[in-house]
């Protein structure tokens, strides 16, 4: 058992990184990856004990986290179908809890990682002799090695944002080519101008929209924090804009509001000069979305009947 634990301890980080990357691609496969990564972490924790490290969350943050879980459990009582809601709670929240368990143990960088990163930062990759003399395959290996020197939280976010480019591109392609998921997410009686709601790889437009709000949030934050690195800023800008366009075409009103609140909080708390670009982006979204967007926004006030997800 000790031999297995030692083997798993060296592999769990890569399992976690892979799990984060595939989260938006296939939900059942992601659940399998979460389960396998969690089981591996539990085995290591059982055999080798809890690692000696400072708590990531402060006491009040831990309390807020447990309060959120308690509210989720109590909410099952008010459901019209308690059995289905309880199963959904176990399935969804259980995966979140499993990921938290693994992240809090393996998602931080070691002193050795920081030392390697410091050594690499002394010379930019594109200016090194190894890069200049490398072919395409060797350059890929060098990029992967450099990626591996980043702090682990940045590796996770990098994988998350990298895959989001594919997800956003598929969603925008669905809008262009008119994919409608057999029409199940479109109600022509209430929204006559709404023909297509994109869902990309996430089956449901609302789930996709929730994912894209996270992508826009991370892209905005990193765009603001990489002022000295123009290429990285452009990469984060492109990632965020692509996700924002895809988010527009999900026609998910609740997530539009969530994204607007997030951007407003960013402007107020961190970058007030971003107000004008954010307002300009909102105006551009209205112009790009046309009448269908206006109808969806109007429906938030109940103008299109009560049988909507907003009313629910």
Image: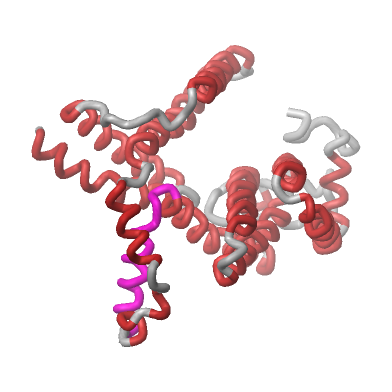
Q: Indicate whether 42 appears above or below 214.
A: above
| Left or right: residue 127 compared with residue 111 | right
In this rendering, the count of numbered labels is: 0
Magenta segment: 135-153
Query: In the image as oriented, which residue stretches furthest toward the right?
Result: 303
Q: Looking at the picture, how far across and down is residue 124, in whole percent?
A: 42, 73
Q: Residue at 39% across / 72% down in the picture?
A: 123
Residue 147 lies in the magenta stretch: yes
Q: Is residue 82 visible?
A: no
Residue 16 lies in the magenta stretch: no
Q: Indicate whether 163 appears above or below 251.
A: below
Q: Residue at 27% across / 51% down in the picture?
A: 112
| Left or right: residue 267 compared with residue 177 | right
Q: Quadrant of residue 225?
A: bottom right
Q: Indicate whether 270 appears above or below 70.
A: below
Closest to the observer: 110 or 249?
Answer: 110
Name the quadrant of the C terminus.
top right
Q: Looking at the picture, how far across and down is residue 278, in whole percent?
A: 78, 55
Q: Is residue 218 visible?
A: yes
Q: Looking at the picture, how far across and down is residue 280, in whole percent?
A: 83, 60
Q: Looking at the picture, how far across and down is residue 86, in whole percent?
A: 50, 20
Q: Which secondary structure dominates the residues rendered in magenta?
A: helix
Closest to the observer: 36 or 10?
Answer: 10
Closest to the observer: 6 or 187?
Answer: 6
Q: Residue at 49% across / 59% down in the picture?
A: 163
Q: Residue at 47% across / 57% down in the picture?
A: 158
Name the quadrant of the N terminus.
top left
| Left or right: residue 268 compared with residue 96 | right
Look at the image and name its color scheme.
secondary structure
Closest to the observer: 304 or 142?
Answer: 142
């Amino acid at each position: 058992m000790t031999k297995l634990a030692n083997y798993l301890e060296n592999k769990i980080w890569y399992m976690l990184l892979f799990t984060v990357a595939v989260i938006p691609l296939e939900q059942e496969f992601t659940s399998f990856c979460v389960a396998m990564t969690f089981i591996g972490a539990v085995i290591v924790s059982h055999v080798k004990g809890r690692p000696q490290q400072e708590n990531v969350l402060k006491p009040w943050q831990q309390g807020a986290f447990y309060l959120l879980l308690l509210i989720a459990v109590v909410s099952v009582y008010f459901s019209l179908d308690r059995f289905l809601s309880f199963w959904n709670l176990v399935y969804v929240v259980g995966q979140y809890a499993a990921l938290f368990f693994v992240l809090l143990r393996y998602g931080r960088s070691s002193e050795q990682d920081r030392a390697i990163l410091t050594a690499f930062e002394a010379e930019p990759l594109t200016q090194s002799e190894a890069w200049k003399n490398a072919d395409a395959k060797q350059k890929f290996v060098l990029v992967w090695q450099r990626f591996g020197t980043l702090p682990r939280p940045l590796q996770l976010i990098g994988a998350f944002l990298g895959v989001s480019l594919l997800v956003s591109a598929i969603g925008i392609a669905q809008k262009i080519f008119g994919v409608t998921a057999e029409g199940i997410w479109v109600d022509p009686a209430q929204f006559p101008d709404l023909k297509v709601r994109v869902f990309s790889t996430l089956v449901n437009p609302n789930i996709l929209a929730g994912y894209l709000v996270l992508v826009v949030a991370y892209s905005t934050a990193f765009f603001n924090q990489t002022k000295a690195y123009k290429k990285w800023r452009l990469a984060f800008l492109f990632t965020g804009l692509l996700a924002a366009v895809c988010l527009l075409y999900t026609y998910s009103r609740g997530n539009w509001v969530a994204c607007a609140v997030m951007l407003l909080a960013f402007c107020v708390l961190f970058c007030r000069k971003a107000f004008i670009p954010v307002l300009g982006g909102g105006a551009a979204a209205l112009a790009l979305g046309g009448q269908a967007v206006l109808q969806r926004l109007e429906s938030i006030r109940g103008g299109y009947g009560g049988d909507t997800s907003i009313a629910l």
